[in-house]
Image: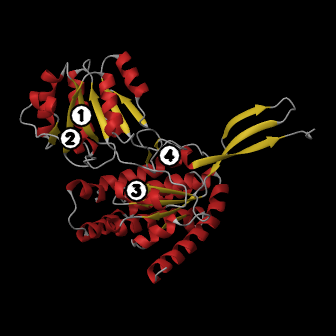
Amino acid sequence: MNAIAQDAASQLEAAARAARAAAGQVARAPRPVKDLALRTAAAALRARQDALLAANAADLAAATGLTAAYTDRLTLTPARVEAMAQGLEEVAALEDPVGRVLAEWQRPNGLVMRRVAQPLGVIGMIFESRPNVTADAAALCLKSGNAVILRGGRESLHSAGAIHACIAEGLRAAGLPEAAVQVAQTADRAFVGAMLKAAGLIDLIIPRGGKGLVTRVQEESRVPVLAHAEGLCHTYVHTAADPAMARSVLANAKMRRTGVCGATETLLIDAACAPTLLPLLVADLAALGCGFRADARARAICPELPAAAEADFATEWLDSMLSVAVVDGVDSALDHIRRFGSEHTEAIITEDATAAAAFLNGLDSAVGMWNASTQFCDGGEFGFGAEIGIATGRLHARGPVGLEQLCTYRYHVLGTGQTRP
């Protein structure tokens, strides 16, 4: 191990041991204490808004070669600072997930079995450009009784540090250990490597970023991973779609914020309605600055659209670009999604309830939507207050990860003196 890796390993071990000790205190903290920490942190975000924006400006000034969508993810505004503060308060207002009785039953011998929610322990969060992840992850981990070690990207180092200072103020006000929420002071990749090797010190790793980051974490981690894969989301306009609704929903799903994982990346449209509706959808999006990559059937209707290569349908654009394909009904749309999708979020626009049910039931994706923008795939919109990511794997959690998904469970067995024969 070289000196840099050795130093990173030492830093991570010290942080993880402090987090482990803090996790025990946070797990036992009553709800009013945790809520006080969150509300105080929210007040600190508002009070320190100028400092937060200055730190963010330093990050933006230092960043080079970023796309418009990446810059958008990195940027803080007064409205986004307020949204972070509101997110902390919304999490504080939610019921405490720790100690919930998930199930209870009685055996013939009189023993009462209870399955009870408990925190996971120490969570390692690795994320890239979005500084608000610092606040969201801190809030959800704290309320669910976990400690968290956050390692943000180089681009958001100053912003994450300024946000963390507000979280630390909340922890101090509530008498909770500051080690419950830690932000790595380095963007060195060696620290990520140390996190991935920290089995026994970290209980769960959550990567939130691009395909390269998630792939590295999945390949190298010795710690269990809650994966957030690509957001290759589809909106399918069924032949029974209301045209005005289709136009409104698609424009929002694609162009509201192109750099978020819930943005629609591919439009699928039924052949029966494509000749009349597709030109309108294209015109709407083009007016908003969107570009296109279209298959041959779509180009037969809109010849001005650039031709799509097969790889385009497997691309998460995270930008003002949309792949377009014409399909032949629900089964054809589902086949396309299974071939190219990332099992994140898909939507159908239709007035036909039978077609909607067939679509939703036929999906493998974590989230399916009917007559709604894919950009609603967000923890706040689900009522979770915030999210720590969108899980697209098959184990433990799927979709937006909120408080309940950051808990595991144990069993309490209540007896009256029973002995086993």
Instruction: Measure how far apart labels 1 and 2 are at the Cα level.
Output: 7 Å
Marks 2/3 in contact by CB < 8 Å: the verdict is no
Marks 1/2 in contact by CB < 8 Å: the verdict is yes
Residue corresponding to mark 2? 322
**Label 2, residues with CA under 10 Å away: few <14, some 14-19, many ≥20:** many
Residue 267: mark in rendering: 1
Give the answer, above or below, for where 139 lies relative to 335: below
As shown in the figure, which amino acid type bears the numbered disc 2? Leu
Where on the picture, by quarter, is residue 64? bottom left
**Label 1, residues with CA under 10 Å away: few <14, some 14-19, many ≥20:** many
Q: Earlier in the sequence, mark 2 or mark 4?
A: 2
Q: Is residue 39 visible?
A: no
Instruction: Measure how far apart labels 2 and 4 are at the Cα level.
Output: 30 Å
Mark 2 or 4: in front is 2
As shown in the figure, which amino acid type bears the numbered disc 1? Leu
What is the residue that sits farthest to the bottom in this orientation? 3
Of residues 303 and 252, the one nearer the viewer is: 303
Residue 215: mark in rendering: 3
Instruction: Measure how far apart labels 3 and 1 are at the Cα level.
Output: 26 Å
What is the residue that sits farthest to the left in this orientation? 304
The kind of secondary structure element at disc 2 is strand
Residue corresponding to mark 4? 402
